[in-house]
Amino acid sequence: MPRESLAVKRRRAVAVLDRLAPLYPGGEQALLEYHDPFTLLIAVLLSAQTTDAAVNKVTPELFRRWPRAQELASASTGEVAEVIHSLGFYNTKAKNSILCAQKLLADFGGVVPQTMEELTSLPGVGRKTANIVLNSAFGHAVGIAVDTHVFRIATRLRLTSASEPVKAERDLLRIIPQSYWSTVNRSWVLFGREYCSARRPHCAACPTNDLCPSAGKA
């Protein structure tokens, strides 16, 4: 495929998003179950290298026992690890969840902050987590949450050749108009699960087949 200009990539990216919009409505709603910004923050923190479905199985008990930063900050790592032990890296996630709650209390009065800089100052919180919390909890689309699905799809669409999610996000922010930022993650996660899977993408049935340079080659 010939080298594309930024304008051409932008038109193709927008065409993909417009086609997927009616298939995956819901805008900025997160795919994780949560009650408020704090429970969303912890749920996203727990979701690293783990499916949303797995996280949704453990969070009802987790949030029943520790519904706010005030309670979670006083929990022991062993207690939290026992509740979330079915998740990958559960010991590290338990520790980071408690440290995150403690820093929320110490620096933000137990309230989840609403800026990228403040959120990423919390233990275990990177740009992906911060983007999802800002978008889903507060309606602030300041970036695009690049998880494994978004990274894979952006690469297959040749919207980025970056080797890591943070750099891929920079490419996507240049290409995708800001009015679409709030819907990219949810739309592409669902699209990735249904069509553009990691091992066996369903290119023949894909609704964006004609817009994808990698169709049939993944």
Image: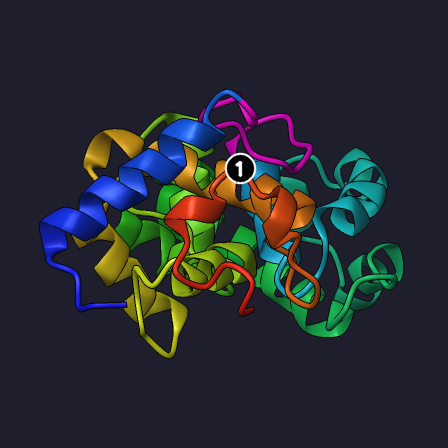
Figure quadrant of residue 155: bottom left
Mark 1 surroundings within 10 Å by alpha-carbon count, few (fewer than 14), some (14 through 19), many (20 or more): some
Q: Is residue 57 above or below residue 147?
A: above
Residue bounds of the magenta highlight? 23-37
Q: Residue at x 54, y 62 (%)?
A: 148
Residue picked out by circle 1: 207
Q: Nearer the viewer, residue 183 or 60?
A: 183
Q: Position of residue 182 (x, y in %)?
A: 36, 33
Residue 116 in view in this figure: yes
Front residue of 83 and 79: 83
Question: Magenta stretch containing residue 32, yes or no?
Answer: yes
Tag 1: amino acid: Pro
Residue 138: give x, y in percent of width and height.
Answer: 38, 27
What residue appears at the point 82 percent right and 57 percent down from the top-left corner? 84
Indicate the position of residue 164 as horizontal and vertical percent values.
Answer: 39, 75
In the image: residue 109, left or right of residue 76: left
141 on left or right of 89: left
